[in-house]
Every structure is written in C-alpha cells, then in structure tokens.
C-alpha cells in the first residue's frame, strides 16, 4: 500500500509551469532569484571557506600528532625499531588519506591497514591502524 502525503514529484521530467498555482509561481521565482543573487553566493562562499579552514586545521593537527609520535618511537629509539603501529581515532577517517600522502611523511612509509567493513558495522569506533616504517 502506498500513501502520498503530497503530490508525487518526478525529478526526471521538467516542471510544467501551467500546473503551478500563481502563489507557487511567485514563491518559486523569489527562491530562484535569491539563490542566484550575490548575497546568497557570498554567504555560501563564506560557509565553504569556513569548512575548508576547519578541515585544513584538522589535517595540520593530525600531522603534528603523528609526527610527534613517530619521532618519539622511531627516531629517538635505537636502530632496532624499524616498524611501528599507531592508532588513530575513527573520527579522522575522512582526512587520513590526505595526511598519509603529505610531503611531511616523505621519510616514512605510512600505510593504512585494511579493516573488514563488517567489523566497522559492529564496532563503529574501531581505531584506524597505521603501519609506519622508515624508508631505506
């Protein structure tokens, strides 16, 4: 049994203006003009710039955290330690690939361990495991 609360909308067909009521035509034209205005575009650009700045700050924070951890484990210890495993919180999953490919880690080989997606469904907060090895 299907129930429609409002009229069914087909996104593949173009809008037929003759089927719209006069009030819907007026509100649609105002919305369209507003979204095309410089004011709206400026607000949208500012919001995207803020999100980009927050993302770059998170990337820098994760880089500094990883570099500090790698420095204490690999560089200051004896030459016997060649590979370490670092845990990173799952919240950094969206930026971890950008951090791994960063120039700051050129002297190390960073690789993310594969995790079965079924494990992530069962344990969504499972940390990301990074294997770090010195480049030879």
Image: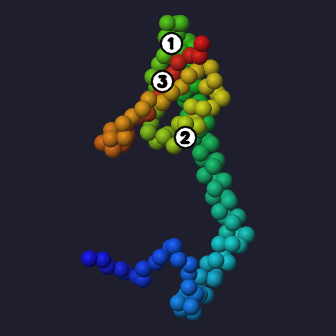
Tell me the residue that label 2 is attached to.
95
Res. 85 visible in picture:
yes
- Residue 115's place in the image compared with 3, above or below, is above
Looking at marks 2 and 3 on the same chain, the residue that comes earlier in the sequence is marked by: 2
Q: Residue at x 64, y 47 (%)?
A: 53
Q: Residue at x 62, y 20 (%)?
A: 107
Label 2: how many residues lie within 10 Å, few (<14), some (14-19) or many (20+)?
Answer: some
Alpha carbon of mark 2 to alpha carbon of mark 3: how far?
17 Å
Q: Which mark is residue 26?
A: none
Give residue 34's position: percent from left, percent from top. Answer: 66, 76
Residue most extreme to the left: 1
Res. 61 visible in picture:
no
Work out whether residue 11 or residue 52 is closer to the camera in this orientation and state it: 11
Tell me the residue that label 1 is attached to.
82
Give residue 26's position: percent from left, percent from top. Answer: 61, 87
Image quadrant occupied by the N terminus: bottom left
Give residue 23's position: percent from left, percent from top. Answer: 56, 90
């Amino acid at each position: 049994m299907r129930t429609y609360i409002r009229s069914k909308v087909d996104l593949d067909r173009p809008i037929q203006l003759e089927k719209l009521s006069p009030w819907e035509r007026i509100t649609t034209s105002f919305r369209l003009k507003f979204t095309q205005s410089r004011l709206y575009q400026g607000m949208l650009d500012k919001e995207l710039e803020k999100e980009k700045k927050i993302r770059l700050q998170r990337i820098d924070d994760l880089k500094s955290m990883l570099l500090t951890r790698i420095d204490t484990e690999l560089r200051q210890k004896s030459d016997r330690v060649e590979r370490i495993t670092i845990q990173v919180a799952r919240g950094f999953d969206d930026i971890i690939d950008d951090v791994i490919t960063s120039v700051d880690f050129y002297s190390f080989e960073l690789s993310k361990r594969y995790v079965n997606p079924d494990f992530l469904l069962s344990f969504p907060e499972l940390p990301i495991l990074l294997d770090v090895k010195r480049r030879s």
